[in-house]
Image (tube, rainbow, N blue to C red):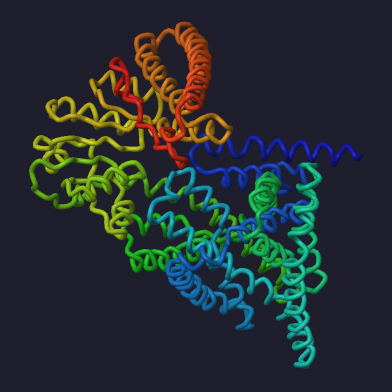
Amino acid sequence: MDKTYLLQAVVLLAAAALAAPLARLLNVGSVLGYLASGILIGPHVLGLFADVEAILHVAELGIVLLLFLIGLELRPIRIWTMRRAIFGAGGGQVIGTGILLAVFAAIFIPSVAVAVVVGLALAMSSTAFVLQVLEERKELTQRHGRLAFSILLFQDLAAIPLIALVPLMAIRGAAADLTQSAIAIAKAFGTIGAVVIGGHFLLTPVYRMVASSGVREAMTAIALLTVLGVAGLMQLAGLSAALGAFIAGVMMADSEYRHQVEADIQPFEGLLLGMFFTAIGMSLDVRLLLDQWPTVLALVVGLVAVKALVLYIVGRWNGLNPRQSRLLAIALSQGGEFAFVILGLATGAHLLSDDRVHLVAVVVTLSMLVTPLLLLVHDFFDRQRAPVAPPEYDNLPSVEGRVVIAGLGRFGQIVARILRARGIPFTALDISPDQIELVRRFGAEGYYGDASRLDILEAAQTGKAKAFVLAIDDMEASLKTAEIVRRYFPHVPIFARARNRQHVHKLMDLGVKEMRRETFLAAIQLSQDLLEGLGVRESEARRMTAAFAELDRRRLYDDYEHASDREKLELNAKRFAEELEQIFHEDSAEAVALARAADGSRNDAPEAARAPAGKPKPERDQPDAPGAAKAS
């Protein structure tokens, strides 16, 4: 192997390994780190790489794999449930931004059709960039984050016909004969149809055969073969490899091997995408930036401003408040990776000159660099701005003697449904307005409010409540709420949900007596069902799981007394296992003896006195031992 290539590979991998962690440490996003590292090691700064195009061609496989993974997620039922946000918000953003940018592009590009393609290409944001930024900021599950995902999803869908359109435009420009254009279009659709039909009948049997071999690397190989094979076939037909990858993903979306394929492809996609953004940074023409910086600056400001304006309007139209709309507008205001793909195809098809494409590439790259900086500036001014206090909670009912439920997640909803069915009034609080909206849609009763705040607990009349149900998922918020209730409403009993043993111990520190670990009882019941499925008698299985539950409750309290002594905890765990094993052994021996005695008495009894055949009456649940703990 050439030493130069080996050294370049080492440098590229080192840049990918260091750029993302350093960028995340600086709180600017990993994609920005990839771009910056690419600029640094590229031909215009340190000059460690000269042939950026070769690296970019290899790294474009990251876009191919990204589209494949997007296709895997696009089940028809999912698109249908998100149809309003995807096609309404996404369609409005792409069309509105595309038209405005096409008008500006027409100033520099004589062909109206090509200007429209450029405008639509620049209307696309960076899916990988935006999702990474929102995930790092923990905003992906917030309202503007979910709307951003829907818009990105539409952009990914819109990019497919746009990618397919560019080669067809080249054919149309080269041959005025409509027959040749019709043949090219028919060839494209024929290839797509052949891929879809062939994939429908061939993929599942092939994957089943490979999976039955039990060779893990064979599954990885067939997954990559599916993506690259379909992508290569589409390229032979004159279409985009990205289009082929997307179709391959959609074909696999309903397959039982989808999750395995996704797990096999994900590492390659992440690494190649990182390499792609690094190569984009390398391709940034620093000399062009320095020579034409007024033009570049004006174009970057224009691109970001136009996209942000349209996105802000789309956000407000979809019910976001001003702050959420601003965050949405900034997060998606940059150009995206599809701009490089589409403009690269346009250059290859001789629809755009190299000079213009290089200028647009610099603008798109800088818009990516600007986005995290704009978010940091927004956050700074957002903290400095005197907050205009929105309603802190809904208007709460004034019914005395009700139960107060803090948290309307899975746990709290079950409690609320049981109380509602029994006719017991309750006030349910949750800090997430989206969660409140969701449960109200299904007929449940809930109110927006932070249960860890004293004023909201007072508004919910917690002091007059018969009980307080602590069902908050977040452990810190749960403990804070328990502390406030115990301090200001000590007469109100707390029934708490605990995530684990440590959570139980911390609640016990606060004086909470009634606690249930969220998975403990379900695991006990499942274990009983498992024992019965393995041939253990129902009564014996019930006794065994009841003995385990009782011992575990005792150990829970014993561990609490020695929570800081790790050695003592380890000894307790070993002693618990030995004691449980001894109890199970004695119980099994006693059960066998009782069964033999019962069989003997039935044989000695007269025929008329024997119990009739049929299903035995289930035994009653064994009550807890007098010393059993209340925390389970």
Q: Residue at x 41, y 58 (%)?
A: 328
Q: In which quarter of the image is the C terminus?
A: top left
Count every numbered label the image shows and give the total.
0
Q: Is residue 22 visible?
A: yes
Residue 438: image location, x then y, percent = 33, 56
Depth check: give the residue in front, 422 or 139: 422
Left of 428 or right of it: where is 341? right
Residue 518: image location, x then y, percent = 38, 34
Toward the right, the furthest residue is: 1
Residue 201 higher or lower than 405, as above or below: below
Q: Residue at x 34, y 41 (%)?
A: 411
Q: In which quarter of the image is the N terminus?
A: top right
Quadrant hosting residue 345: bottom right
Left of 291 or right of it: where is 297? left
Q: Residue at x 28, y 20 (%)?
A: 508
Depth check: give the residue in front, 42 or 244: 244
Left of 449 or right of it: where is 131? right
Quadrant hosting residue 14: top right
Q: Residue at x 60, y 78 (%)?
A: 115
Residue 7 higher or lower than 511, as above or below: below
Residue 182: image location, x then y, percent = 75, 88
Q: Can residue 286 be seen in this view?
A: no
Quadrant hosting residue 559: top left
